[in-house]
Amino acid sequence: MPTKHKFIRKHRKQTRKRTEPKSMNCSPIVTGAKASPNTCYTMEMLELIRASYNKNHPSQDYIPWSNPGEIWQTLNRRLVNCEKEDCWLAEIKDAELRKQIDTLIFAPDQPVEWKTNKNEWLTDLDIRKVMHQYEQAYPNFRFIGPSPINYDTMVPASELYTYKGPPSQTKICVWEELCHIDIAALLAKKIDKIGMVFNLDRHDMPGSHWVSLFVCLDKAHPFVFYFDSGGKSPPPEIQRLMKTIKTQGIKAGLAMKSHTNTNRQHQKGNTECGMYSLFFNITMLTGDSGFEQNMPMQKRIMLFKSANIPDKYVENYRSKYYNN
């Protein structure tokens, strides 16, 4: 009988095909300063990563100085285990520097809680991380907060989670910067836009609803605008603050108007008030509403006073203001 032959199929070794890393949301700080359109890195940061890579991998071909696009492509080919650009920062061994660059270059990471609940309420830290980047991106802008509604209540310093000093019974305002706001001093520092976020709960309560205040100190159209995504009137604490700001504005030669979106309810659900507060402050500052850029100030005001901005619209900004 003829011998039976057993044929063995030989499999080719699979090589991983390098693809473009998943795109990331950049910090507003690097707008206009990116090394190329497909990266969040500035030329300075790209050069730092290139130099660090060469130092860490002496046995591999040296990555020479060249144009930003070529450096980016070379790093992308070499760092095959990185699915996203921020992973490249691992080449920088200084942990503190790595953290600083990450905060400077990229939008904040989404909180881990969002993985199980995509509509998780925003915390004060979630809001602060985004707004502080806009402070750095716009030198004429100051963000204050997020503050509890009773910002001007006097309490022992040690009661406040924001207090970092030794135990103290000395009484201070719940939010000192609001309690002692000084419009003239801000103008002297060339600050003409102020964004604020408040929680309608007191400092000793768990938190309920986020609202905002935006102040424009531009001589062409000075105003103070209270925004509540639920369309409610300003509470007494905010009314006092608005009056204080307007009084100080008059002394600085600014006849400030007051705006609210009272009776114009945007939010219908109960999860997106924090996102509305971010969207309001950022749109009022930048003039970019997502569907229109460089909006005149009056048009920005009318967007929040007269238009209808649905919950879903601001919910989508969870994947724009943050990285998932």
Image: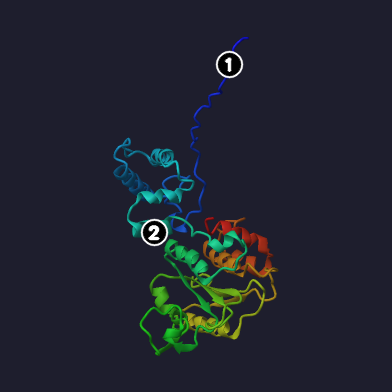
Identity of the residue drawn at 66% across and 78% down:
232
Circle 2 is placed at which residue position?
A: 99
Locate residue 268: give its quadrant.
Answer: bottom right
Residue furthest top as drawn: 1
Circle 1 is placed at which residue position?
A: 5
Identity of the residue drawn at 38% across and 85% down:
167
Q: Is residue 146 visible?
A: yes
Identity of the residue drawn at 38% across and 72% down:
189
Q: Amino acid at mark 1?
A: His
Give the mark count.
2
Locate residue 36: give its quadrant.
Answer: top left
Would residue 219 appear left or right of 47 to someone viewing this image?
right
Q: Is residue 40 visible?
A: no
Q: Secondary structure at mark 2?
A: helix
Disc 1 versus disc 2: distance between alpha carbons?
A: 62 Å
Quadrant placement of the N terminus: top right
Q: Which mark is residue 22?
A: none
Q: Amino acid at mark 2?
A: Lys
Residue 15: x %, y % from top left:
48, 33
